[in-house]
Structures are given as structure tokens and as C-alpha cells.
Image (cartoon, rainbow, N blue to C red):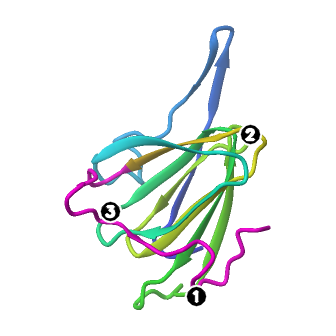
Amino acid sequence: MIQGVKIKKLKIIPDDRGRLMEILRNDDDMFIKFGQVYMTTAKPGVVKAWHWHSKQFDSFTCVSGKMRLALYDAREDSPTKASIEEFEISLANPMVVQIPPGVYHGFKCISEEEAIVINNVTIPYNHSDPDEMRIDEYDNDIDYDWRK
């Protein structure tokens, strides 16, 4: 496992009205602080990658469809430098994956329907000075193939 990445398996609680799933609570071991919660989507086969942050932690979960989340540890001082991790997240396999600063990440929608992803970040997005660096999903030095 990439150093600093945390996983929380989630539990879906059904009843006759529908379902409930707690994603992240402020008393969870993985909770750091609240910055912002947002939703993003990807259409089938679409890749949203690679990006990383210098200060922000991300906590991803997929609430509809299915995504393949990939991580690459680019931190020079990390004992897991150059490691790659991959997770398939959906309501059939519900989890939150917390990604520390310096770890590249991205996801691909691997379902036939659009994937809906919720991300709880520790720092609100700053439009004038974003804590987000990006590289091309295919043209880079990361040994990962999104075409699979």
C-alpha cells in the first residue's frame, strides 16, 4: 500500500424506503478537516487523470456506476516512491480512498453508465491559485495504462 493512503470500507444500510451510506464522519480515524465536498462524473470509458496536490488530501468514493481509481506515489522522500495502487469502487464495493498530497491520482469510468464520484477535500478549491498540478493521462512517465 502506498504510504499515507487510507481505505475505509463502507456499509450500505437498506430499508423499505431506500438505502443510506455514511461516507466520512468527523470522528473517523481518516478524517483530517473539512475543506469542501464536491461531485464529479465521468461517462463510460472516460479517464480523468493525472493530477496531484501539494497540500490537499482527497477522499474519493463512487456512489453510482463504477470507477477504477489509480494512484502513483511521486514523492521523493516516500518509502513507497514509484508504487502504483488501483481500486475498483462502486456501490457493490463501497469504500472511501484517502489520497495524501504528492500522490498522483485519476479515475476511469468502467461501467456502462456514468460514474458519479464524491470527493471530500481538506482545502477548498482556490480558483485564483489552485493546489492542483496536472499531467496528461497517457503521455507521462507513469507506468500505468488506462486502456485496460
Q: Quadrant of residue 25?
A: top left
Q: Residue at x 42, y 91 (%)?
A: 76
Q: Nearer the viewer, residue 4 or 84?
A: 84
The residue under label 3 is: 56
Q: Earlier in the sequence, mark 1 or mark 2?
A: 2
* Magenta-span inclusion, residue 138: yes
Q: Nearer the viewer, mark 3 or mark 1?
A: 1
User: Does residue 42 sit above or below 138 in this rendering?
Assistant: above
The picture places residue 36, in percent across and down from the top left corner, at: 31, 44
User: Does residue 20 sit above or below 31 in this rendering?
Assistant: above
The residue under label 2 is: 92
Q: Secondary structure at mark 2?
A: loop
The residue under label 1 is: 141
| Quadrant in which the N terminus appears | bottom right
Q: Residue at x 28, y 50 (%)?
A: 33
Residues rendered magenta in the picture = 121-148
In the rendered image, the residue lying farthest to the top is 16
The picture places residue 84, in percent across and down from the top left corner, at: 62, 77
User: Does residue 24 sit above or below 1 in this rendering?
Assistant: above
* Magenta-span inclusion, residue 98: no
Amino acid type, label 1: Asp
Amino acid type, label 2: Ala
Q: Quadrant of residue 100?
A: bottom left
